[in-house]
Image (spheres, grey):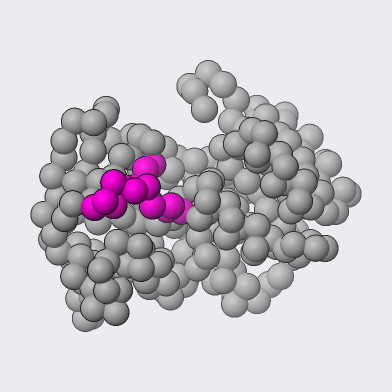
Amino acid sequence: MTDTAPIRLLLVDDEAALREPLAEYLSRQGFDVAQAASAAEARTHIRDETPDLVLLDIMMPGEDGLSLCRHLVEAKAIPTIFLTARGEATDRIVGLEIGADDYVVKPFEPRELVARIRSVLRRAGRAAQPTDNELFEFEGWKLDPLKRRLIDTEGAIVAISSVEFRLLMAFLEHPRQVLDRDRLLDMVQGREAHLFDRAVDNQVSRLRRKIELDSRNPQLIQTVWGGGYMFAADVKRTAA
């Protein structure tokens, strides 16, 4: 995505009566919108052209939105917003826990969805644009924010979701500082995620499994009881 190119959205929903008018509305707002009626169609589209953000219905025949979301955030690190008719808090929590960036409950006001899209993209953009060509190094690991590439101590690339990336960036930009859950949720998930404190705990657990030698005895991301979390390692910034 460049400054002049339109933002590419992929709208995944099996209900054509909702999907097609919504795609038309989003196109009028200046987005480049592709449509998919199933997870299988979405996977095919993503193989051909990676969107900047995916709008994803949870309840679809065949592979559901939760399964597809796991693929999007773990393998592709694509920002994702759930579109769900479910009103239960549990379903929204599950979506945030597996790495979705936000959710909108149907029926929704299209203008609100546009605001959510722009908010998620702003958060993703801020996290991905520190000093030009700068790497973060810690305990033999490297993070390239511009490429969103995490490299382990052996030089292998470790897959990281968009939420995990923003969480790690928050820690690397504030090493040896206690970050409480409210602050982390605001930095990583944005508005309304503060309703689900469990979401940040689950994302920390997922990140620990990727960067800690023993996630059950974490040395890098330490829990500060009653306070939140602290990244307990020195962080060095170097030119890429």
Q: Quadrant of residue 167?
A: bottom left
Q: Quadrant of residue 143?
A: top left
> Does residue 133 appear to the left or right of 112 in the view shown?
left
The residues colored magenta run 148-161
Q: Which residue is rendered at x = 52% and y = 65% of the image?
A: 98
Spot occupied by residue 119 in the image (x, y as percentages of width and height): 49, 44
Above or below: residue 77 compared with residue 164:
above
Residue at the extreme right of the image, as rendered: 17
Q: Nearer the viewer, residue 14 or 70?
A: 70
Spot occupied by residue 211 in the image (x, y as percentages of width and height): 29, 61
Residue at the extreme top of the image, as rendered: 4
Spot occupied by residue 228 in the image (x, y as percentages of width and height): 25, 72
Image mark count: 0
Q: Main secondary structure of the magenta part?
A: loop
Q: Which residue is rendered at x = 65% and y = 57% of the image?
A: 68
Q: Which residue is rendered at x = 33% and y = 40% of the image?
A: 145
Above or below: residue 24 compared with residue 42:
above
> Does residue 93 appear to the left or right of 85 in the view shown?
left
